[in-house]
């Protein structure tokens, strides 16, 4: 629970707004309309990403600002996500309301991890980001998954257990600056538990969370249902220091830590393949493998990039297990979360390039839908050197954030008096190494997406 | 209850969509006017399906006349994406040059049944494509020819074929089947509840 700032944002106009019928619909329906346009444009619009509004909106606007939303507003995107709206809609008219199967509850995050890796791999091998059709097919596959799961299972099972973005947002939201919690003293007297079960004003928590015992922002999508339903005015919405939740995770999960580490690998892959040196790296791989098949050579590079952060993070975990304090996996589960600030920084910095160096493409492709053709040579909002300085700044902040998270996790996880230096030092060195790798990747010139 | 019945009707209508999409795929349109090319002694009528040409598999039919006499020997066909078209395409999001299809060469056999030269080509990218039909000179070729073959060059504009409708229809089918399955599950639950209540 946040100690720094006790001001409950729900006491003012925000609380009134979230309790009203306008929230979150006032955001949800415009998002749905824009999403429909994006689907149409990616599938039936111009086949060149350069001219496609759907591609521009998805990869130049939405993907870059998503991590920013997670830092500032937690998992708010999930409250207005068109897929969530779609899931609720099909569930209302066709829902079978089956309970979530045990395997999804137990292994859902692993499925999310696998999906994230698969989609990133498929993007490079088959072309998703650079191909409006590819983007459209991906969105339609997700659309189908959402509809199927929404029809069969209760609440937002897709969002909670299967959405690859949900896994990412869960991790990033832990580093976010906003938290929704209940007031335990008020919950003690509650007879209805409407926050979870639902009430007259809104359904129960779609993310299967029980606010009374909720101690993480990872699953809370700020839909406001509990705020509307709570008869005791127990729900609070407060700001907090960014990354604070990472310092004291009560139940570290290996699959969540693994996702956090894997995201670093994905940032590496996304950066490396957009560098000018990538063709020469590819050529080197071709001579190593003896084949010019991009499928084979990229898969090899991808595997290396994915494995690198995992292996690096396993080193201190291994030594920690040798010292007898805890098992390797438990140690990795605990400290894996510390990489999230660097993940966020790398993700933001990479996509900042696309947003600021190609941002005007959103405007040009939008007017292009109405027949106004503009042959543009640059879609940049800022010049490359300014963007690069912003990227360095973000990587530096992310590295510091991760190092501090290592320190705080070590302090919070072991009894007072434990010598945590043995734990802190190796992980700190690793965060510095990862920070330097990111720095170098952003130092090298990057190609455009549009 | 009414909403459920309406939904079932909508579901049935939606399930027709994949069949329509498949039917559209097999229906051959009326053959339109051929593209006519006249160059020196040669006169060529080109029929293409689909017309206009779109990315993917395209059938070409050539009626080739030389000095008003139809040619029936096997010829060679070369085709490639236009250089300038590729230069305008830029790069994809990972810095790779967008695929440029270099010179391809295929045999152009004469089909006796159709009395035409037939070939099926797979054109992967939209834009301007350059085609060349090669006519090898026979034993009676004249010394004045500067090369061993005559070349007839023509350009065709290829449009984007749009999304794969079969794939989308398949996804639609999956959603439809799920709706049907859900209706069955709900019905089963109702029956069980009724039996339990009894």
Image (spheres, rainbow, N blue to C red):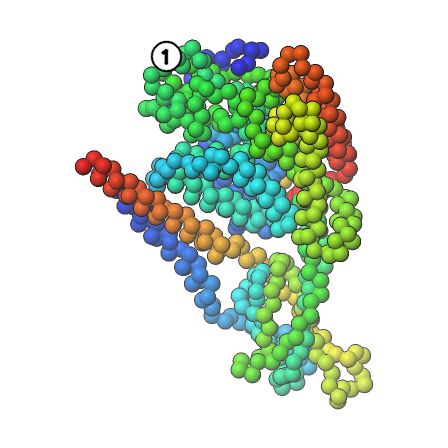
Looking at the picture, how far across and down is residue A273, in whole percent? 71, 43
Give the quarter of the image for residue A437.
top right
Q: Pick the residue in front: A290 or A388.
A: A290
Q: Mark 1 points at which residue?
A: A189
Q: Say whether residue B126 is visible.
A: yes
Going by the picture, which residue comes out furthest to the left?
B198
Q: Pick the residue in front: B71 or A220.
A: A220
Q: Pick the residue in front: A36 or A297.
A: A297
Looking at the picture, how far across and down is residue A443, in whole percent? 77, 34
Q: How many residues crowd around disc 1 within 10 Å: few (fewer than 14), some, or many (20 or more)?
A: few
Q: Residue at x 43, y 23 (%)?
A: A210
Establish if A60 lies above or below B172.
above
Quadrant for the C terminus of chain A, please: top right
Q: Which chain carries label 1?
A: A
Q: Which residue is drawn at 61% across and 33% down?
A: A258
Q: Is disc 1 placed on a helix, strand or loop?
A: loop
Q: As drawn, is A294 to the left or to the right of B191?
A: right
Looking at the picture, how far across and down is residue A181, in whole percent? 48, 18
Q: Pick the residue in front: A252 or A235.
A: A252
Going by the picture, which residue comes out furthest to the bottom?
B140
Q: Say whether residue A344 is visible.
A: no
Looking at the picture, how far across and down is residue B63, in whole percent? 59, 78
Q: Residue at x 53, y 80 (%)?
A: B114
Q: How many marks?
A: 1
Q: Which residue is drawn at 56% across and 11% down?
A: A3
């Amino acid at each position: 629970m946040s100690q720094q700032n006790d001001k409950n944002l729900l006491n003012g106009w925000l609380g009134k707004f979230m309790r009203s019928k306008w929230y979150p619909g006032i955001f949800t329906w415009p998002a749905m309309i824009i999403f429909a346009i994006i689907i149409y444009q990616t599938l039936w619009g111009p086949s060149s990403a350069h001219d496609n509004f759907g591609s521009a909106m998805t990869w130049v606007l939405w993907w870059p600002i998503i991590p920013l939303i997670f830092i500032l507003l937690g998992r708010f995107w999930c409250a207005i996500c068109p897929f969530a709206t779609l899931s609720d809609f099909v569930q209302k008219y066709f829902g079978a309301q089956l309970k979530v199967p045990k395997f999804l509850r137990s292994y859902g995050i692993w499925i999310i991890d696998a999906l994230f890796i698969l989609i990133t791999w498929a993007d490079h091998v088959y072309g998703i980001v650079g191909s409006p059709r590819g983007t459209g097919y991906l969105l339609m596959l997700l659309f189908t998954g959402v509809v199927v799961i929404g029809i069969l299972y209760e609440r937002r099972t897709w969002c909670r257990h299967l959405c690859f973005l949900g896994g990412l947002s869960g991790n990033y939201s832990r580093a976010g600056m906003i938290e929704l919690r209940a007031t335990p003293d008020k919950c003690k007297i509650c007879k209805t538990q409407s926050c979870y079960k639902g009430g007259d004003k809104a359904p129960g928590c779609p993310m299967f969370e029980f606010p009374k015992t909720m101690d993480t922002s990872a699953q809370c999508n700020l839909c406001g249902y509990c705020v509307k339903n709570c008869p005791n005015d127990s729900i609070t919405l407060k700001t907090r220091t960014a990354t604070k939740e990472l310092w004291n995770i009560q139940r570290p999960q290996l699959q969540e830590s693994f996702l956090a580490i894997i995201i670093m690998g994905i940032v590496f892959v996304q950066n490396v393949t957009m560098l000018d040196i990538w063709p020469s790296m590819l050529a080197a791989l071709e001579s190593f493998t003896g084949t010019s098949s991009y499928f084979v050579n990229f898969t090899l590079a991808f595997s290396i990039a994915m494995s690198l952060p995992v292996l690096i993070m396993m080193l201190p975990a291994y030594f920690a297990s040798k010292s007898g304090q805890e098992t390797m996996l438990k140690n990795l589960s605990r400290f894996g979360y510390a990489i999230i600030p660097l993940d966020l920084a790398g993700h933001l910095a990479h996509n900042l390039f696309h947003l600021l160096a190609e941002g005007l493409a959103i405007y040009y492709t939008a007017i292009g839908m109405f027949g106004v053709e503009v042959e543009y040579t640059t879609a940049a909002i800022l010049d490359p050197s300014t963007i690069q300085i912003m990227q360095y700044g973000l990587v530096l902040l992310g590295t510091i954030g991760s190092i501090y998270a290592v320190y705080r996790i070590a302090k919070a996880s072991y009894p007072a008096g434990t010598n945590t230096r043995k734990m802190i030092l190796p992980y700190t060195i690793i965060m510095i190494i990862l920070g330097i790798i990111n720095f170098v990747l952003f130092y090298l010139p990057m190609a455009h997406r549009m | 209850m009414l909403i459920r019945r309406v939904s079932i009707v909508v579901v049935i209508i939606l399930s027709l969509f994949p069949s329509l999409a498949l039917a559209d795929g097999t229906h051959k349109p009326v053959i339109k006017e051929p593209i006519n090319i006249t160059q020196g002694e040669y006169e060529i009528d080109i029929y293409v399906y689909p017309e206009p040409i779109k990315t993917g598999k395209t059938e070409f039919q050539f009626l080739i006349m030389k000095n008003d006499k139809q040619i029936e020997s096997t010829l060679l066909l070369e085709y490639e994406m236009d250089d300038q078209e590729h230069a305008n395409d830029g790069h994809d999001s990972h810095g790779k040059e967008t695929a440029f299809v270099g010179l391809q060469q295929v045999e152009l056999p004469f089909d006796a049944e159709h009395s035409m030269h037939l070939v099926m080509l797979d054109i992967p990218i939209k834009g301007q494509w350059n085609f060349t039909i090669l006519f090898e000179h026979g034993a009676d070729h004249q010394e004045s020819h500067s090369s061993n073959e005559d070349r007839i060059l023509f350009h065709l504009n290829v449009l984007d074929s749009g999304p794969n409708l079969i794939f989308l229809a398949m996804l639609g089918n999956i959603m439809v089947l799920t709706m049907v399955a859900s209706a069955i599950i709900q019905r089963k639950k109702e029956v069980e509840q009724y039996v339990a209540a009894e």
